[in-house]
Image (cartoon, grey):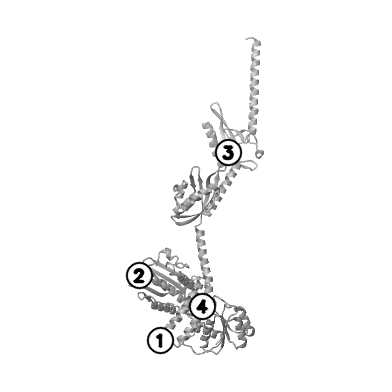
Amino acid sequence: MTDDQELAALRRRVEQLEDQLREVAADHTALRRVLDSIPAVVLRVGLDGMIEYVNRVLPEYALRPPVGQSIYSYAPPDQHELMRAAIDEAVRTGDDASFESLALAPDGTRDWYHTIVAAVREGDEAIGVIMTCSSITRLKEVERALRESRERVALALDAGNVGVWRWDRRIDHVDWDDKLCSMFGVAPQDAPSTAEAFLALISEDQRDAMRAHIEASVASGTYADFELRVDTPDGVRWFVIKGGVIRDDGGAVVGLLGGVVDDTERRRLMEHVRESQKLEAMGQLAAGVAHNFNNMLAGIVPVVELAARDARPPLDELLAEARQSALRAAELVKSLMLVSRREPTGTARPREALAVVIERAVQLCRRTFSRQITIETGDLSAAASTPVDAVQLEQALLNLLLNARDALENVASTRARITVTATRVELGGATGAPKAAVEVRVRDHGAGMDEATRSRVFEPFFTTKPVGAGTGLGLTTAWTTIKAHGGTLTCESTPGVGTTFAFQLPIAEVADDAHADASVSDRTPSSDACVLVIDDDDTVCRATAAGLASEGYRVVTASSGEDGVRLSATHDVDVVVLDYSMPGLGPKATLELLRTRRPALPVILYSGLAAHLDGASAHVAKPATSEHLRAEIRRVLGR
């Protein structure tokens, strides 16, 4: 080859190299533009971990440029092993590896990055890695917010006792969460997977309504609340199903989504509220009935007492029984008012030793119960030192004894026995010191009660008797009366063995009671005082006047407050017996006018209502025995 030929070949080679250089430069420029435009940071890292190249330096790394720094200096120590493992995997396998790490910038910035690692090779030998790092800080924040939101929703659902469900109608697939499975009492693996499987879990009488509700929700595009009663292993539960529709991109309803709220406790609470409202209504009714009913009895008791004074046997015994029946009838009204917290306050009530009250109640039951029932009493001396409201405690004991009698209804006569005992016990006081009390136990050997019945015996209106045979108020009033005396009443019962009611009252010495009834045999006039009786009920007025007149009092009667004020001005009145509920001038205004002329005039409020009158000298509940009313008159007169 000549020199010219060699020179020409050399020129061509140089031109080829220049063309290749231009192509490489173009490729480098393009690659540079790609690296500059992608939102990731691209680093070339040696196998020793030193950064050899970076496509961009972020502002937070300007204080210490990455090139020449160790890749490990930008991550917490606990992440170094994770990074090494990814680099080793990429070098060893030739496949890409990845990891997530928290990068610590020199300016204190902390960002999360997702890094893809690819090996760089020369021939078969790896000489480094390329790391492509994408910031996922925002994604991490979204994930954290979503996780916290889910946790809050889960807490809210759990606190609200809500289970979540979803139905995809396109494939007829139902999803239940674990909470909903628990509410229905089914294991998660046994949860219904189709609409029909869900319908099979509910009672047949609700199934058609539930199916129609689902169809209507799909057709209308709205889901109304649906109440569902479910028999679960834990008993009957009431659920409220709430939900909404799921639509596809075209707006068609493709499913339903919602939650189930356990409404059982709210229903139970509402039931208690309704029972309380019944009790309140009963109390309001009692307040109205009491006045009229007690006015009737107030017209009966004095007349029966007057008739009994001169009656001969056996009429005297019958009249005595009639008197006791009238007083017990009055106590029934007071018991009803006591249950509704409307029992009259401020009234003078006779008090007797508990032992006397027990003996009297037992004797009454012995005379009136079937002769097949034996009533036994033990030593009652432990109850001799406990003063009680004689009328209320006798009624409470009678309620317990009547309950025991009913429990023996189907018991053979050889076992029909009621036992009443009284023993002294020591109770722990508030300061820990023993406190003496008397415990009275009323035990029957009847059929007994199961736990479900026993737990409800003190509830108002609860009874095991058929409709019309009782309301259950007896045990409620007994519990209320004993609680008002500072005691407790409990019930123990075993099916087939019998029932024991036990109440404990603090022991105290019986004191002379200024409000106790005067002796029945004390019939001599204790005063010739003038008593003004003001009552709009003519029968009560005449009966009260007759009873007082028989004791030697001079009596003047008035049918209204206005008449009473007028008569007080023309008569030398020593004491006034004033009814509470009258037409016209009310009791408060009547009292004020009566005392305009006589500021110290004693005024006794005499009413069958749960009434209290400020300024009254005494309060006496209708009907009262003549002894009781006379004792109050003597007390306010100071005689």
Give the mark toward the camera: 2 or 1. 1
Q: Quadrant of residue 108?
A: top right
Which element carries disc 4, helix, strand or loop? Answer: helix
| Mark 2 or mark 1, earlier in chain | 1
Amino acid under label 4? Answer: Asn
Measured Cα–Cα span from mark 4 to mark 1: 29 Å
Query: Any mark on residue 313, and which?
Result: 1
Q: Residues within 10 Å of mark 1 (few under 14, many from 20)?
A: few
141 to 12, vertically: above or below: below
Q: Position of residue 480 (x, y in %)?
A: 49, 71
Amino acid under label 1? Answer: Pro
Q: Residue at x 47, y 72 (%)?
A: 477
Amino acid under label 2? Answer: Val
Give the mark toward the camera: 3 or 4. 4
The reply to whether the C-beta atoms of the residues labelled 2 and 4 are less than 8 Å apart is no
Give the mark toward the camera: 3 or 1. 1
